Every structure is written in structure tokens, then in C-alpha cells.
Image: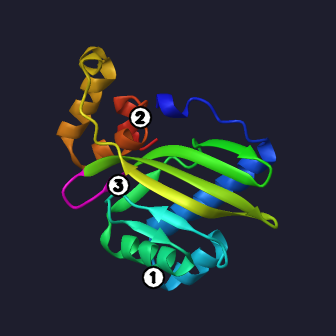
Amino acid sequence: MQYLQQAGDAPPQVRSGVLTALRAFQDGYIKRDPKNLDSFMNRLFAKNADILIQGTNAAEWARGYPAATEFIRKDWKDWGDFRFAADDSVVWSSGDVAWIATVGAVRSRKSDHPLRFSAILTRSGDRWVFRELHFQLDERDASSGDVLRPETYLRLARLALGGTHQWPALIRPDLSYTESLSGR
């Protein structure tokens, strides 16, 4: 995961607070319980803030708290299983603003799709809240240089195996075959 090799420039206390918000966001997307949507939104988004969410499709553009709530409700109901590398996120900050970048994957009924995930958060009292989220599918074609990289062949082998073998590899392509099978 060459993208996530550096932690960013956020001081440790800021990074810790931002990672707490990212873990809570990940937890909500794992559980996907509509009964918990209001508490999820209240904990992670400011009702009076100008929020923007950009989804993977061109028409997925939600602005404002009500639209963001509906976007996430629809994601939890209709989108695949979204997982991302919360603890490995790159976190930068300046004052009460932090921005992150990370990678993950979304598992649908038919396949897994690598994803890039970025966000901007602001400090609200003692917590960090999301102001902007951007989901981007990472469906690039392999470059000629990828053919020479051993991890390309490992990834192809993992994809060919299907099932649970490919899931850890998409989130953590740096894992060895044995580590991905053990779920590390």
C-alpha cells in the first residue's frame, strides 16, 4: 500500500481524534443498521454545517445534513459492504481542520471493487466531524510496469481464488498470501 506509507503531518492528539471518527464511520458502515442512523449522523456530522458527499457515480452528490443522511441511508440499504483501512489512513491537519486519504474496497454481490476514500473533518468541541466525503472507485487498467511487479501476480491469484481470499488482499495488498488467508 504505497499510498499509505506515511502517516501525514497531523499531531498525535489530532490523529487520534480523527482516527476515532474514522473507526466510528467504519463501524456504522459495517453494521448498516438503519435504527442507528440518527445517532451515527449526530455523532459524526454537524447538523448546521455545510456537508458534501460525493459518491462513486457521477449523480451521487449530496449536500447538506438531510441529503447526507439520505445518502448514507441509501448506501447502507443498497450499496455493497464497504471496508477501508481506517488505522492506516494518512491524516494531515491545520488548526481545527483535518483531511484524510485511505484505501479500501466495496464488496457487491458479484465482485469486490478497490476504492479510494478521502474526507475533510473539522473539530467540534472535543470531537471531529465530517464535512466532506469522497468515494472513488480505483478501477484503473494495469500499466505495462505492473506486469513486472510480483504483487500483480499475487493479486491476480487472490482474485482467481475468489471468496474470502480476495477480501483482505484488496484492503491490504501488501499482505502475503498466508497473512491474507489468516485474516490479518
| Image: magenta residue range | 105-111
- Residue beneath label 2, please? 179
Disc 1 to disc 2, C-alpha distance: 33 Å
Q: Is residue 179 left or right of residue 159?
A: right
The mark nearer the N terminus, 1 or 2, is: 1
- Residue beneath label 3, please? 106
Q: Is residue 153 left or right of residue 39?
A: left
Q: Secondary structure at mark 2?
A: helix
The mark nearer the N terminus, 3 or 1, is: 1
Q: Based on the picture, tell me whether residue 167 belongs to the magenta stretch.
A: no
Which of the 4 image quarters holds residue 143?
top left
The label number, if any, that marks residue 155 in the structure image: none
- Residue beneath label 1, please? 34
Question: Which amino acid does the dot numbered 3 rest on?
Answer: Val
Q: Secondary structure at mark 3?
A: strand
Rendered position, 115 above or below 23? above
Q: Name the residue: 29% across, 16% down.
A: 145
Q: Residues within 10 Å of mark 3 (few under 14, many from 20)?
A: some
Question: Which amino acid does the dot numbered 1 rest on?
Answer: Pro
Q: Name the residue: 22% across, 31% down.
A: 157
